Image (spheres, rainbow, N blue to C red):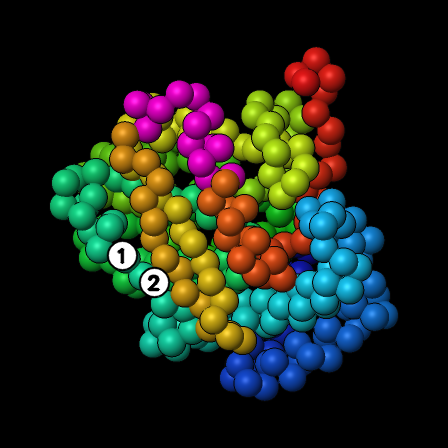
Amino acid sequence: MKHIGYYILYAVLWLVSLLPLRLLYLFSDFCYVVVYYVVRYRVKVTRTNLLNAFPDKSDAERLAIERRFYRHLCDYAFETLRMMHMDEHEIGRHIVFENTALLEHYAAEGRNVFAVFGHYGNWEWVCSLPLHLHGMSVSTLYKTLKNSAMDRFFIHLRSRYGTHCYARKQVLRGIVELKRLGKPFVMAFIADQTPSPGNAHYWTTWLRQDTPFLTGWEQIARKQNEPVVFLAVKKVKRGHYVCRLEPLCDNPQTTPPNALVEKYARRMEQNIDENPAWWLWSHKRWKYQRPNICR
């Protein structure tokens, strides 16, 4: 039954995604009204997150961010759906990568790269990075979805342009396999996810509130002593993004524990503050409190 459900879902989404983006945005406009005004999808969560993140903004300012966020969230869904039929030329018109020479420089030195970014803009389109690199593969860690049909669907989308997906428990084995191939690679992590209580080893003030961060990616980067880059995403206009590659650290072993996580947190915070509406505010990012023993 799970396989049947997947193929039915895939067939429906495949047909809808045949439409060009300009028509899908009409569906997105309708979806925004339903999701925001009728269903009220996680509006309480979003509103609380914005209040805690921007206590100095007025109610009107936060409400404007909230509405722009829900419009963007619906756009993100249909933009991602369109990936099923986007060839490399079409997606190349919608997301531009700047400073890819940084990765090519590391590749020329025979070094691998760890890349970190967040749920900002259209993070699914960032998976088209392999189209802009020569002699360097791209892999990413992904969090397995509870719905197996949706999990298979998103793996298919993220793999379309050459990005290989590793589940969390497979990433270390994946790095070993990639090293054996002898070809420089990029291993990308979405690093703004909420760690489970048992993995909340590092806390910092982020977006004006106490926030735990995943530290596994930094531990791997320090052990391998491979350079770390930050993917700074900017939404230029509807359906158009720029992703700039910025050096975060060349030699992680020279930094103290959690220094890279802190550096990522500050840069990601800056990215969000530049235009808050494009971050995933409906995510329950602050559902855990720091244990008193750690304060």
Q: Quarter of the image containing the C terminus? A: top right
Say whether residue 262 is magenta.
yes
In the displayed structure, does residue 24 sit left or right of residue 229? right
Q: Which residues are magenta?
A: 252-265
Q: Residue at x 78, y 54 (%)?
A: 47
Evaluate if marks 2 and 1 touch, with contact meaning CB atoms under 8 Å apart. Answer: yes
From the viewer's side, name the closer residue of 43 and 50: 50
> Helix, strand or loop at disc 2?
strand
Principal secondary structure, stretch drawn in magenta: helix
Q: Residue at x 28, y 57 (%)?
A: 99
Q: Quadrant of residue 75?
A: bottom right
In the displayed structure, does residue 272 sit left or right of residue 246? right
Residue that mark 1 sits on = 100
Q: Quadrant of residue 58?
A: bottom right
From the viewer's side, name the closer residue of 152 and 219: 219
- Marks counted in the figure total 2
> Helix, strand or loop at disc 1?
loop
Q: Residue at x 55, y 85 (%)?
A: 22
From the viewer's side, name the closer residue of 107 and 65: 65
